[in-house]
Amino acid sequence: MPTRYTVKPGDCLSSIAARFGFGWRTLYDAPDNAELKKKRPNPNVIFPGDVVVIPDPAPHEVEVSSGSSHKFKLKRKPTLLRLVAAVDEPHKFLLEVAGEELRGTTDGKAPIEMKVDPLALEGTLRLWPDASGAPEDPPDDAVSWTLRIGFLDPVEETSGVKGRLLNLGYYDGPVNGEVDDLTTAAIRRFREDEGLEIKDEIDGELRNKLAKAHDEASA
């Protein structure tokens, strides 16, 4: 019988699918999740309280010999973490997630991509200028971010608006469902930069611009 799973903070379809032994696409395209798919057109961004229907797993058949023990190992399929660093010149980076490292150089035009454990919740990204003689390891003055993987809410939610304003450098405060002075100041700055009417309101135009500036950059 299918299971109804209620989404919790930090959940994404990849992590939910990994816990139940599925691929995220299987869950997202399941007929029982048609309403979820309609409500959340971006499968990478779901919201606490959403319900994901977990179908009954199909049995796997294997042939084994009798009279001996056998070991079966279930491998979790990694998910892709994609980040964009807004830099004007090449920077070196060190991305660390769940004990794995990725090093390289970014010019801000192409995303930084790393295959990670779908159950990972945190990571760290460090950036420093790729100047002549730049060290291979992050210097003390490298810019550092703590990544909360899976915690970005849909842009339709106030917390999703604030999360995107935070990631784009317009906001520096708690990410929740409240609209305070810090939030309205960030909204006004973003609107001004995007050539929108300067006002405090969170409307469809603002959400669309935020989604384009944030989500499409890393799509």
Image (cartoon, rainbow, N blue to C red):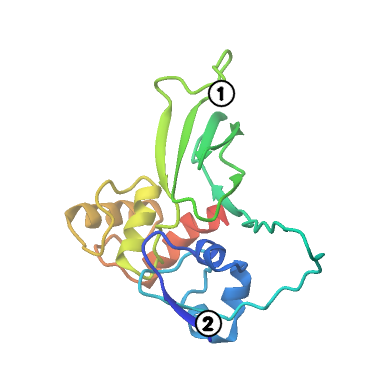
User: Which residue carries the number 2 mark?
Assistant: 33
Nearest to viewer (mark 2 / mark 1): 2
Q: In whole angstroms, how far apart are the C-alphas of marks 2 and 1?
A: 46 Å
Q: Residue lying farthest left?
A: 181
Question: Is any part of residue 98 visible from this angle?
Answer: yes
Q: Secondary structure at mark 2?
A: helix
Q: Residue at x 57, y 75 (%)?
A: 28
Looking at the image, residue 203 sits to the left or right of residue 107; the answer is: left
The tally of labels here is: 2
Vertical relation: 49 (above or below) 149: below
Q: Reading the chain from its start, which is encountered first: label 2 or label 1?
A: 2
Place of residue 11 in the rendered image (x, y in percent of width and height, measured from the top left): 44, 62
Question: Which disc, if any, is residue 152?
Answer: none
Q: Nearer the viewer, residue 150 or 179?
A: 150
Q: Label 1: few (<14), some or many (≥20) within 10 Å? A: some
Vertical relation: 219 (above or below) 100: below
The three-letter code of the residue at mark 2 reads: Asn
User: In which quarter of the view is residue 63 placed?
Assistant: bottom right
Place of residue 176 in the rendered image (x, y in percent of width and height, measured from the top left): 26, 60
